[in-house]
Image (cartoon, rainbow, N blue to C red):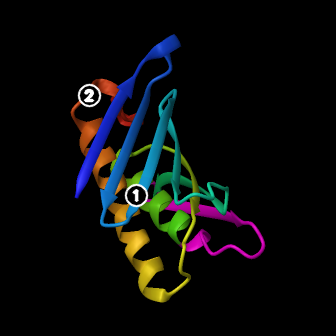
């Protein structure tokens, strides 16, 4: 498995680019910092596209800081099945980053088998975890509670 991580701060836009290569698959993650929030794009294959978008908004159950939660809403393009992964990633990143996140997923599968889809989804989750690790190594991970 090969990881490629780049950070850019051109024009004061904070972005991460992460690519995870495994076997014959690779998944690309682009993350753009939007104030305290994040815009995440996950793509793979030759047919980059928007398959689904999910919005994750962190909060607390009954305003109890001991009960964090993330509310997730999603939209899916007809004929695509990227929405389940987009919702999962929006929930996980919203919780770990304690930030509002917009997640766009467009994973192109050469073979539409359950095994291939599962494999790509696992690589996408590795990409997301690498992203969280990198954010935690920078001062970009400032959370709402820190301000």
Residue 90: percent from the left, percent from the top?
49, 58
Number of marks in the image?
2
Q: CA distance from mark 1 to mark 2?
A: 25 Å
Q: Indicate yes or no whether the magenta region holds residue 105.
A: no
Specify the farthest residue to the bottom: 114
For the point 40% across and 58% down, the residue is 26
Secondary structure at numbered mark 2: loop
- Which residue is the site of mark 1? 26
Q: Is residue 45 visible?
A: yes
Q: Is residue 127 left or right of residue 117?
A: left
- Which residue is the site of mark 2? 138
Which stretch did the figure color magenta? Answer: 61-84
Residue 142: percent from the left, percent from the top?
35, 30
Q: Is residue 16 left or right of residue 23?
A: right
Identify which residue, 97 or 131, lies in the foreground: 131
Looking at the rendered image, the quarter that the N terminus falls into is bottom left
Q: Is residue 32 placed above or below 99 in the rendered structure?
A: above
For the point 54% across and 66% down, the residue is 87
For the point 47% across and 53% down, the residue is 59
Residue 146: percent from the left, percent from the top?
33, 29
Residue 35: percent from the left, percent from the top?
51, 26
Identify which residue, 39 or 96, lies in the foreground: 39
For the point 42% across and 79% down, the residue is 118
Identify which residue, 70 or 125, lies in the foreground: 125
Disc on the earlier residue, 1 or 2: 1
Mark number, residue 37: none
Q: Are marks 1 and 2 in contact (CB under 8 Å)?
A: no
Q: Is residue 118 placed above or below 87 in the rendered structure?
A: below
């Amino acid at each position: 498995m090969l990881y490629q991580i780049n950070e850019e701060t051109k024009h004061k836009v904070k972005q991460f680019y992460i690519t995870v290569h495994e076997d014959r698959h690779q998944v690309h993650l682009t993350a753009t910092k939007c104030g305290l929030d994040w815009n995440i794009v996950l793509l793979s294959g030759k047919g980059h596209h928007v398959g689904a978008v999910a919005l994750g908004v962190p909060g607390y159950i009954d305003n109890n800081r001991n009960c964090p939660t993330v509310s997730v809403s999603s939209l899916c393009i007809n004929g695509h099945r990227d929405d389940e992964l987009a919702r999962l990633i929006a929930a996980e990143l919203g919780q770990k980053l304690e930030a509002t996140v917009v997640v766009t997923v467009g994973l192109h599968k050469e073979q539409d088998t359950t095994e291939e889809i599962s494999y790509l989804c696992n690589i996408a989750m590795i990409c997301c975890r690498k992203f969280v690790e990198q954010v935690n190594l920078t001062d970009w991970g400032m959370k709402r509670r820190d301000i």
